[in-house]
Image (tube, rainbow, N blue to C red):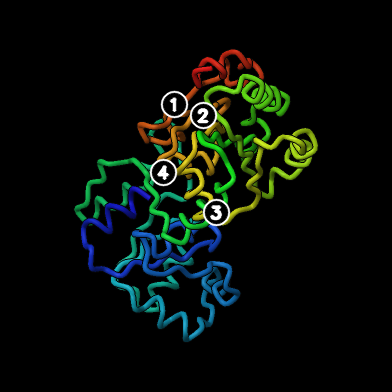
């Protein structure tokens, strides 16, 4: 997003399109960053990853119509890039397909823009929910008493997760204390199904507890915009920070100097020895002001 933001600022009149996974790219679609998105899962695109392939005419015209293509695809043999050139692509910049240790990911992803004379100094990601996104959030929160706390107990890796028992105890402590927050929302996606089944069972009779499962990312961003958030090193944590939520993030085996949101509203708690089991409930409670 910082790279996209810099591109948009450098030439506000340019048309920007994103080729990617629609369920992710939608957070940028007609929300400041991109004028359109296109699915990378389109079957005919597979030919672009083969040498000397017969390229579909519609895609030849599509790629050939861009003045600049910035690619973050893993393309070590430049097969995809060479096929783009066959389409008449005017200029192609290659971004890193992998993030390396030592430098923040946002800076690494923005580095290719230096070839255009654009120096990306602002690494803070920001999301711009639409009126429709915010309308959904208002309806979702209509029966919820503020302040609202959103909890995301999952991530893309079990090693990056604080034990689920700790999340349960944290929620119970907050509910019993009846201070700080009057509504707790558990946020989850497909990878969190097991944990959510357990949490739904435990908190099914708690009127102050709600569940936001599998929401489209723009709607979730609008919901988090009105919440305080606790999570791990995950995409949802970056979404919450970019939406402007006050965030408390628990980091274990991954380096927050590379992976943590750069937003000033995000506070990181780094586990001793990178082991999240060594963070106790009291430490997290103190961090959020309980």
Report, in whole angstroms, how far the alpha carbon at label 2 lies from the one at label 3.
27 Å
Q: Residues within 10 Å of mark 1 (few under 14, many from 20)?
A: some
Dot 3 or dot 4, earlier in sequence: 3
- Nearest the camera: 36 or 211? 211
Is the residue 117 above or below the residue 55 in the image? above
Q: Quadrant of residue 18?
A: bottom left
Residues under numbered marks 3 and 1 in contact, where contact means CB atoms less than 8 Å apart: no
Considering the numbered disc 2 on the image, is that residue within a helix, a strand or a loop?
strand
Q: Quadrant of residue 230?
A: top right
Q: Quadrant of the C terminus?
A: top right
What label does residue 267 carry, if any? 1
Dot 4 or dot 1, earlier in sequence: 4
Report, in whole angstroms, how far the alpha carbon at label 3 lies from the one at label 1.
29 Å
Q: Give the left or right position of residue 15, taking residue 168 as reference.
A: left
The residue at 34%/59% (across/down) is 32
The residue at 45%/68% (across/down) is 37
What label does residue 242 carry, if any? 4
The residue at 31%/70% (across/down) is 15
Identify the residue under disc 3: 139
Considering the numbered disc 1 on the image, is that residue within a helix, a strand or a loop?
strand
Is the residue 288 above or below the residue 194 in the image? above
Report, in whole angstroms, how far the alpha carbon at label 3 lies from the one at label 4.
21 Å
Identify the residue under disc 2: 249
Could you say where residue 211 lies in the image, as x and y percent from the top left? Answer: 66, 44
Report, in whole angstroms, how far the alpha carbon at label 2 lies from the one at label 4.
13 Å
Considering the numbered disc 3 on the image, is that residue within a helix, a strand or a loop?
helix
Report, in whole angstroms, how far the alpha carbon at label 4 lies from the one at label 1.
13 Å
Q: Quadrant of residue 81?
A: bottom left
Could you say where residue 289 lies in the image, as x and y percent from the top left? Answer: 49, 18
Residues under numbered marks 2 and 1 in contact, where contact means CB atoms less than 8 Å apart: yes
Dot 2 or dot 1, earlier in sequence: 2
Considering the numbered disc 4 on the image, is that residue within a helix, a strand or a loop?
helix
């Amino acid at each position: 997003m910082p790279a996209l933001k810099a591109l948009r600022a450098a030439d506000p009149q340019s048309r920007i399109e994103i080729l990617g996974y629609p369920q992710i790219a939608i957070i940028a679609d007609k929300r400041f960053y991109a004028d359109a998105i296109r699915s990378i899962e389109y079957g005919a695109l597979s030919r672009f990853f083969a040498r000397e392939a017969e390229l579909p005419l519609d895609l030849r015209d599509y790629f050939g119509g861009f003045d600049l293509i910035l690619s973050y695809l893993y393309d070590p043999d430049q097969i995809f890039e060479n096929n783009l050139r066959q389409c008449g692509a005017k200029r192609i910049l290659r971004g890193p397909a992998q993030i390396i240790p030592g430098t923040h990911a946002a800076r690494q992803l923005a580095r290719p823009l230096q070839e255009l004379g654009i120096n990306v100094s602002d690494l803070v990601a920001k999301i711009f929910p639409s009126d429709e996104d915010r309308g959904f959030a208002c309806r979702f929160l209509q029966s919820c008493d503020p302040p609202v706390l959103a909890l995301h107990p999952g991530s893309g890796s079990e090693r990056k997760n604080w034990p689920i028992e700790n999340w349960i105890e944290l929620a119970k402590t907050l509910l019993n204390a009846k201070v700080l927050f009057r509504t707790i929302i558990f946020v989850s996606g497909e990878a969190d199904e097991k944990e959510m089944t357990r949490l739904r069972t435990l908190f099914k009779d708690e009127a102050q507890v709600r569940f936001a499962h599998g929401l489209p990312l723009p709607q979730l961003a609008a919901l988090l915009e009105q919440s305080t958030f606790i999570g791990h090193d995950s995409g949802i944590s970056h979404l919450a920070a970019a939406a402007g939520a006050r965030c408390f993030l628990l980091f274990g085996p991954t380096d927050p100097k590379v992976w943590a949101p750069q937003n000033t509203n995000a506070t990181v708690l780094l586990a001793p020895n990178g082991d999240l089991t060594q963070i106790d409930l009291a430490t997290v409670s103190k961090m959020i002001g309980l």
